[in-house]
Amino acid sequence: MSKKPQYDPEEIRFPQQKIVESPLVPEMEKSYIDYAMSVIVGRALPDVRDGLKPVHRRILYAMYEDNLTYDHAFRKCATAVGDVLGRYHPHGDASVYDALVRLAQDFSMRYMLVDGHGNFGSVDGDPPAAYRYTEARLARISDEMLRDIDKDTVDWDPNFDETRREPKVLPSRFPNLLVNGSSGIAVGMATNIPPHSLREVVGAVICLLDDPDATLTDLMQHIQGPDFPTKGIIMGRAGIRAAYATGRGRVTIRARHEFEEFGRDRTRIVITEIPYQVNKRMLIKSMADQVEDKRLEGISNIQDESDRSGMRIVIELKRDANPQVVLNRLFAQTQLQTTFAINMLALVEVDGKLQPKILSLRHILDEYIAHQESVVTRRTRFDLRKAQERAHLLEGLLIAQDNIDEVIRIVRTSYDDAKENLMARFGLDDVQAAAICDMRIISLQGLNREKLENEYKELEEKIAWFQKVLSDEGLVRQILKEELTAIADRYGDERMTEIQDVEDEIDIEDLIEEEQCVFTLTQAGY
């Protein structure tokens, strides 16, 4: 016997509700596409303009708001993570801390955006310490990511609970997408952009500013190829060119090695640099396992002698082993040689909406230049407005200084209508009169006409310069070139990853030692 329901369904009334019948399949398709676009735009892919995903942008901006810049003391990472979660990023704390840690790893970032203090993990795959132990602040170069953000240079969105505003994109005064690269897996698509040398990328941007018709060959005179923080050697240029031309390509990265003699006629292979994103500990374990399983021959011992001065993996060979053959087998069978699949997918703003697109090198640089021209123009408009407001105020102060005795008399003898009396007597507007009324009598008496006139003259020169910049696109580009050159001079360094020209990839014949052989053939052909 079934229980009687405690309520009568007929008694529940929703007179305003509207039930829309929808077929299941189209509804699921629409809902999944909405979800996919949310992941693509709001989580997994970087913006082509600043090269950051939303979580990284929020970390940098929240730390900037808290004055955690390079010239201030370190603060616990728990503080930064909590502020990001509470203000802008309502997701798990682990995702925020993992993103912050990566920004501080010298083996992940070509130019670190966060300065970390404590255990932030290692190239061996060691995890970072918990955020209650580590400390962080913005790296010096992050100043360039956020410079002029307070001058209305970018658009803003409300945060998740509409109590604050967050930047849609950072000013990013250097081309961060190419300089630091990015990797991410969205829904149905993924991005994998390698890092590059700051000097080389800035050189390519300036080349494009000087010659808008520059070809890929011209750009590659400046950008030789990817430049990984773990160094290594890139084999060949075909994959690099394909990636820069189409947005997709594959480059082969090899570890750097040298042969050393030791003992009696013994040789060892010393690895001093490994490919990007390779876990050193797992690499050594893989080699040791293959030696034990007899899949790698000619190796007698493997040991890791890395220390704070650098990486050093020592592979000792047996007396009768051919060093080059063993090395070729290591390249073929271990991560001493890896392939980096370049897929330059990023978000591009089209008609006010972000869309994922696979971009060529030229397209990325064009989008970056357009963003920087917008930043410089908007900054100049902001500076012009502030200069004009100050000049207008100074005009009122100069009038007050010329008639200082009468102004002081009006202010002293008037009660609630001092502002109106000043406006009526001297033809001042509301802003000028309010500024005079807000000054103390001693400050009014101490107004120095020469000082006011000098400041007014300087402002007039600035206003003329700002107006000239806003009316001349060539001047905007010249300013952009000068600022980019200054950034490259301040933060640029030498290329880390060598690029070697090769004719072919590893052939199977390279794995076989050359030696004299005798073959016997029977009449039957055996």
Image (cartoon, helix red, strand yellow):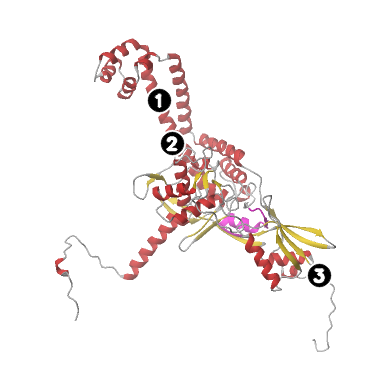
The image quadrant that residue 155 belongs to is: top left
Q: Quadrant of the N terminus?
A: bottom left
Judging by the rendered image, the residue that carries numbered circle 3 is 514
> Which residues lie in the magenta part?
230-250
Disc 1, SS: helix
Q: Amino acid at mark 3?
A: Glu
Q: In front here: 121 or 295?
A: 121
Disc 2, SS: helix
Disc 3, SS: loop
Question: What x and y, as percent, mark residue 517?
Answer: 84, 76
Question: What x and y, as percent, mark residue 455?
Answer: 45, 20
Judging by the rendered image, the residue that carries numbered circle 2 is 151
Question: What x and y, as percent, mark residue 484?
Answer: 56, 39
Residue placed farthest to the top in the image?
405
Disc number for residue 512:
none
Does residue 249 show up magenta in the picture? yes
